[in-house]
Image: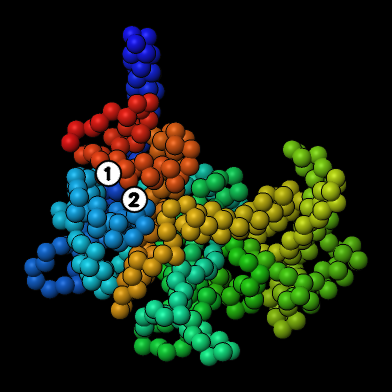
Amino acid sequence: MSNQISSTVKTRKRDIARMEKITVRKHLNSDALIATMKKGFDAIQDHRPGNVQHSLGDTCMAGFAMFSLKDPSLLAFDERRKKGPHNLMTIYGMGTIPCDTSMREILDDVDPNDLRPLFKDAFRQLQRGKILEQMVFMQDSYLLNLDGTGYFSSSKLYSDACMEKIHKNGKRTYYLQVVGAAFVHPNFKEVIPLSPEAIRKQDGQTKMDCERNAIKRFLKKFRQDHPHLKVIINEDALSSNAPHIDDLEQYACHYILGVKEGDHKFLFQHVDRAAEAGEAIELVIADKVKEELLHYFRIVYDAPLNKSNQERRVTFVEYWEENTKTGKIQRFSWVTDLDVTEDNVYLFMRGARARWKIENETFNTLKNQGYNFGHNYGLGKKYLSEVFIMLTMLAFLIDQILQLCCPLFNAAWKEWKSKRSLWEKVRSKFHEFSIQTMEELYRSLLEHKQVPLSR
């Protein structure tokens, strides 16, 4: 028995020593970032006249906390509110905590654009901490991926904002989508999401919205928020058209856009003729890690985008990867305005192929790793569903910053193996103990034996 106690004491001391070695950065830790969010929420002008029971700042923070804690529903969050202890007040800085009905009613009238500055506030902390500059990709520019995804679909529930699809059998499907945007880098697992743009019926309009129009709105708002930031927009083959490239140039954005032969026959015929005339740059690069892989490249400068827009000249890059053992070949092709050469074409390819990170590292993470993206927290009558999407993305942004910058967060994640397990332990701590800070909570998760915190 004494040996068991001695072993427990030694383990406890080792865990304490390990935790004490883990330090957090002043502005890039969970508590500091939550404080940044609270300050941003409090700065939004309340749309309600007179005295109110719950301030708009507290209500927005309640919604943010719900997504930060990965509560699966408003009902689950409301149960937390009723039971206490109210770590929501100590950690998230709320004066009062609205019930689920009040939260829906208050947030429904919040203009989603009023939440945009909070993304910029968090982004500024990354710039301040000299973290963002590590993600510069090419030509002193950041790689910004754009793509659309759905987050609501129903044959029965709908709001005035919902898009409609009428099927051949006469049935209707109501749905909502969003254009997501995230800074990525081929060397980083983390992504830095920006404020999304909803695809919905616009106020005063009956016609359906579309991804292209939403991207145009996004670009305008992006340049308002980041007027001087150099970016390379990375998109799929649906975006490789002259009007969209005009939009990108209007907002001073470089681009990498996928192209497919079936949609750009004139372009591919031009490339074939250039190759036959010896006017294309062609090279083969052996993979430095996997000996069985060969990387083939073809570059053609000053190529016409398509037959209808021959004056629109682009650089065409074709790439195929061959596995010499299996014989498997993968092919990709893009158009760009970047200065692609033999020296940087491999790097270019890695960035172009990183387009999948908007789908895998962003949308799939939100849908499959505890964020409940796609769960209907409420449609509302005006903006509720969009506000909830914005708050979800803010919670995801803070988590990505912590994953990128906070050793304490990463140590807790490593201790509990998966994000889902980590979220479960965080919610469990919130339910069982009074806690003053997220730092205190994360450090408690690293203890070998769980020691009750003060009630």
Residue under numbered circle 2: 69
Q: Amino acid at mark 2?
A: Leu
Residue 104 lies, in percent from the top left, at 26, 69
Which residue is depicted at the point 29% across and 40% down?
429
| Quadrant in the picture for residue 291 | top right
- Left or right: residue 383 versus residue 86 is right
Q: Amino acid at mark 1?
A: Phe
Residue under numbered circle 1: 430
| Disc 2 secondary structure class | loop
| Disc 1 secondary structure class | helix
**Does residue 216 sit above or below 196 in this rendering?**
below
Look at the image and tell me whether residue 119 can be seen: no
**Does residue 298 sit above or below 400 in this rendering?**
below
Given residues 122 and 141, the one toward you in this image is: 122
Residue 413 lies, in percent from the top left, at 44, 38
Asked if the residue under mark 1 is in contact with the one under mark 2, i.e. CB atoms within 8 Å, the reply is: yes
Which label belongs to residue 201?
none
Which residue is depicted at the point 66% across and 70% down?
237
Total label count? 2
Which residue is depicted at the point 22% across and 68% down?
101
Task: Mark 2: give few (<14), some (14-19) or many (20+) Cα within 10 Å.
Answer: some
Q: How is the image coloured?
A: rainbow
